[in-house]
Image: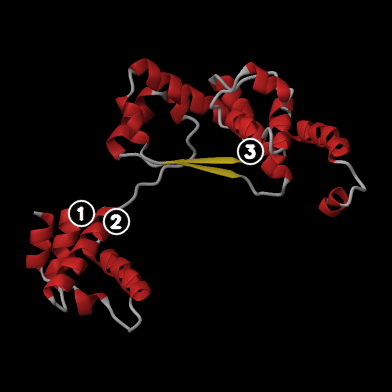
Amino acid sequence: MKSLIDEGDILLSELVPKAIQMLSDVTKFADFARAIVHMVYEDTNLYAWQWLTAEGIRYEQRKEMEIHSALDDDTMGVRAFTALKNMLLELNYTGVFVFVDEFESVARLSPKNEQATLNSLRHLMDQNSSGLSMMFGCAPEVWQDIMSEYHAFSERIGREVSLRPMTEEHLKTLVDSYLELASDDPVSVADVFEEDSLQLILQSSQGNVRQALSICSYTVDDAAERGRSNIDAEIIQEIVS
């Protein structure tokens, strides 16, 4: 098709109305379809992207793309997301997976805004009962409060999985995998970290993978500067203190 357009056998202007109509039938949102199609034009692709990401554009810019609505509230946001999901499903994607990390941040909102946020998420899930999977990462104590206080939201959560703290064996496996990537020669965690140092890393990081890797990175650099071939608890203690 691209070669036909490049060679002038088919005009892009002839395809666009048909493309918009076909995409509108799939997404059930004509303005969304117009914005997607206008992504191919150099003079409007920025406006189209700004509209799709709800940045807000002037009326004149929307008029140029024949877009009549704005993504300026929760209802329109859900409608646009649903349109995106429908388009991806039409392209033979299995579904849309949304990962929401640090969900405990909602607890810092005012009660009114927290309720509004959870209601919006509930509405999003209700409008997309198939083809959408949402996963929330949240501190246990905040999650329990949300589940007990907001029943309309909690009833839409299909499964809960509690993550277990990282053990020393997990830490060894994790560090081993990083050493394998970083070293040209065969090297294991026991060649670099003494047993008591691993225990201190685990204790200091409180089982958090990111913090454990950060401590390991700092201590490896520190040991290299000292000309040390291995890392003991003394070096770890200096790093974390």
Q: Does the CB distance between marks 3 and 2 fall below 8 Å?
A: no
Residue at x-position 14% and y-position 67%: 197
Residue at x-position 84% and y-position 54%: 3
Q: Which mark, residue 205?
A: 1
Q: Position of residue 50 (x, y in %)?
A: 58, 30
Q: Earlier in the sequence, mark 3 or mark 1?
A: 3
Using a 10 Å C-alpha cutoff, classify the residue at mark 2 as few (fewer than 14 neighbours), some (14 to 19) or many (20 or more): some
The residue identified by callout 3 is 130
- Hey, what amino acid is under mark 2? Val
Q: Which mark, residue 209?
A: 2
The number of callouts visible is 3
Q: Is residue 173 above or below residue 95?
A: below
Q: Is 15 or 7 nearer to us in this picture?
A: 7
Q: Is residue 126 above or below residue 194?
A: above
Q: Earlier in the sequence, mark 3 or mark 2?
A: 3
Residue at x-position 72% and y-position 23%: 64
Q: Secondary structure at mark 1?
A: helix
Q: Does the CB distance between marks 1 and 2 fall below 8 Å?
A: yes
Q: Is residue 169 above or below residue 144?
A: below
- Give the quarter of the image for residue 212: bottom left
Q: Is residue 72 left or right of residue 201?
A: right
Residue at x-position 11% and y-position 71%: 232
Q: Is residue 51 visible?
A: yes
Q: Position of residue 82 (x, y in %)?
A: 63, 32
